[in-house]
Image (spheres, grey):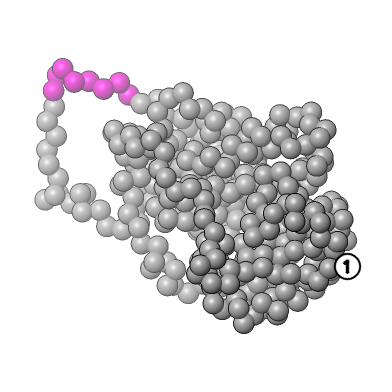
Amino acid sequence: MKEEEVNRCQIQNWYPKFKSLTIKTKFHKLPESFINYLIDDSGPFLLPDSVTNEDAMPNRVHNFEEEDDFQVPEESSDNETEPPLNRPSFPELEIEVRESIETLGGIIIPKLNWSAPKDAAWISPSQNLSCTCFNEIALLFRSSDSLIHDLCNAYDSCIDKVSSRPESFYLALRKWYPSLKPEMEFRCFVKSNDLVGICQREVTTFYPVLLNEKDLIKGLIEEFFDDQIRFEFESQNYTFDVYVTKERKVKLIDFNTWCGSTLPLMYTWEELEKIHGECDELELRIVESRLSVLPGLKTAVPYDYLDVSPGSGWDQVLKIAEEEFQKENQSSDEFA
């Protein structure tokens, strides 16, 4: 794999060409100060100082502790004086992000050049990657180990590696669709410009509906690749993720490299290398039963995030309540 192949998979690079086929996305070039904030683990876990108090973290349900009859007077002590916290602040970026979130309907999924912070969903108020404000994005990014790939290791698998990081980092804000079903997302493997394998993207769950629609879905993805991807994406070896809508339209989600940090999911890379494209019958692999599910991303909470002292990241997280189920029950449209 070469650096140019890795660079083609950056969302800010492929999005302009495939804009009509994918999820609406807004981009923000990140200042170096924010990148340094993401990789700095020398101090306590602090969320950025927000431009306005209401943007710090949304209250998603009623907070009883804010009621007058629930509050307990704080005891003051002349001997106990805590130094003020020196919070990081990115006011210009926050304002830009807030405007983009409003444009995209009020809820987004964030990602960097290549990766989304999927391993940090456990810390989100929604228990998924949906965000409504800048500090929710910062919380996910600071809690994610997978984003270290983008920040520090993006070119580690390149045979012609000369860069330690991309020229610029971008925050991609992607419109959130609560009605999307995880069983309808698939990873596709392209070798020598031939589609050689397809598999279920969410491999930790058995979805019976896929058993009856397997052949139909395979045909839809094959047609989509031939018509929209094969002669448009410049690399010869790569992977791409798609979503099949209830109207049986295929939508592009993302591009990823062949091998490297990309997970082969229900295949192995050795197996995929041996497939001869058009000479072999294209296979769509799905989880056939509950006994066949694969382990998912790690969900253990890092010790660093157990700090609940005043002003810590967890101190703010614990003040956030959830009403995500109500949002999901509201009317929502699938991207068309």
Q: Residue at x 60, y 78 (%)?
A: 211
Q: Which residue is mark 1?
A: 279
The residue depicted at 42 percent of the width and 66 percent of the height is: 327
Q: Is residue 214 left or right of residue 60?
A: right
* Magenta span includes 333: no
Q: SS class of the residue under badge 1?
A: helix
Query: Relative to the observer, which residue lies in front, 274 or 237?
Result: 274
Which quadrant of the rendered structure holds the N terminus? top right
Q: Is residue 44 left or right of residue 319?
A: right
Residue 28: image quadrant is top right
Residue 16 visible to an observer of this rendering:
no
Report the residue that reaches farthest toward the top.
Answer: 79
- The amino acid at mark 1 is Cys
Seen from the viewer's position, the closer of residues 113 and 26 is 113
Q: Position of residue 112 (x, y in %)?
A: 62, 44
Q: Please give left or right for residue 67 compared with residue 203 in the image.
A: left
Residue in the image at 70% along x and 79% along y: 215
Residue 20 position in % (x across, y down): 74, 64
Quadrant position of the C terminus in the picture:
bottom right
Residue 119 at what x, y percent from top left?
A: 51, 48
**Residue at the spot 58% in from the left edge and 49% down from the top edge:** 116
- Give the dominant element type of the magenta stretch: helix, strand or loop: loop
What range is drawn magenta here? Answer: 77-84
